[in-house]
């Protein structure tokens, strides 16, 4: 239970593997923050401010720090899985991760760009499914990676409920 | 017909606007090639080589140069639209562009990563719709931008037919 099996893989290559591993972590962080940058292009402006919102709608300042933490954690999770043999060995799990990342990136332009909460809600359901499948695929490879995705899945579940509520409140 | 209305917008800001415009072009190229990089992670290997293919299947070396040209053209197209007032003025058209880019990025991990041609075909239909909507949204803003997307739409149409055929030939 407490043994960290993921370290054995990393040691095999020695110093060269250490550099490659650090570059890979940078690559995963870059990929995740490139997806995050899509969110920054469509700032919640007057349109969002004017929407009817539920009483439990979080204040706007919450989203920035929360997403920064979630993108960092998901990059580390993908990196932990990647360390167990790269794309060759973890093809399915890492493919699912990239699918959920792309669906994550598509949500902001749908909701804040096109201002189509209904379409965005349909999309977030697919995104949620891809993310849940990713977490389940990460679990047997690295427990730590699966745990790092847990707050992300919880937040996307909350975001889906919020998206649905905003859609119903603003027909 | 022959007047280039898009240049007037660019002139308004003088030299400062020129630098900003060049940086924006670099930004659009970066965004498109970040999405392209997803394709590079899943190389068509033994699995793809072993698939039954139609006689009209293009040779593997075609895809690299074609996609490089298409990603460059789509970045220039988005930039031409962005120049007409940025995200504030072209919110809908640029949102559609980013949705199609995210759906483009999701296709490779579905097909080559998960090796699910059926799922990838369902996804490419949504991608095709988002791309066609983007072309139609670009058209009134910049004819040049719409034309730059035309080969991309043609290629994705062909890719969808190829995807469907590969799915049916390899049940």
Image: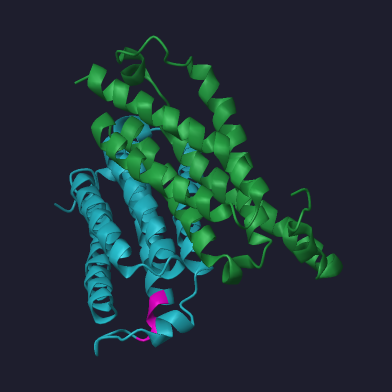
Chain colours: A cyan, B green
Residue A84 image point, x, y percent:
31, 38
Residue A91 at x, y = what percent? 31, 34
Residue at the far front: name it: B1
Q: Residue shown at 37%/24% (left/top)?
A: B162
Which residue of the protein is positioned furthest toward the right in this rendering? B15
Would you say residue A155 sits in the magenta stretch? no
Task: Measuring from the top left, give residue B46's x and y in whole percent.
Answer: 34, 17
Residue B128 picture location, percent across and down: 40, 42
Q: Residue at x 30, y 36 (%)?
A: B120
- In the rendered image, the residue lying farthest to the bottom is A55
Please state if A95 lies on the left or on the right of B144 as rendered. Answer: left
Depicted A15 relative to depicted B53: above or below: below
Residue extent of the magenta highlight? A59-63
Q: Report the quarter where the C terminus of chain A lies.
A: bottom left
Q: Main secondary structure of the magenta part?
A: helix
Above or below, comparing residue A75 to residue A68 in the picture: above
């Amino acid at each position: 239970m407490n043994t960290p099996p993921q370290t054995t893989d990393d040691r095999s290559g020695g110093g060269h593997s250490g550099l490659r591993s650090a570059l890979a972590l940078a690559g995963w962080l870059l990929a995740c923050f490139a997806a995050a940058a899509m969110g920054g292009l469509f700032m919640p402006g007057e349109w969002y401010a004017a929407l009817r919102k539920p009483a439990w709608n979080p204040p706007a300042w919450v989203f920035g720090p929360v997403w920064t933490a979630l993108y960092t954690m998901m990059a580390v999770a993908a990196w932990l899985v990647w360390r167990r043999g790269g794309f060759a060995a973890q093809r399915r799990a890492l493919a699912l991760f990239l699918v959920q990342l792309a669906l994550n990136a598509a949500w902001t332009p749908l909701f804040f760009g096109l201002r189509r909460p209904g379409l965005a809600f349909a999309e977030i359901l697919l995104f949620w499914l891809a993310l849940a499948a990713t977490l389940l695929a990460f679990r047997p490879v690295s427990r730590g990676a699966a745990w790092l995705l847990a707050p992300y899945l919880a937040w996307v579940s909350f975001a889906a409920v919020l998206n649905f509520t905003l859609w119903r409140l603003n027909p």
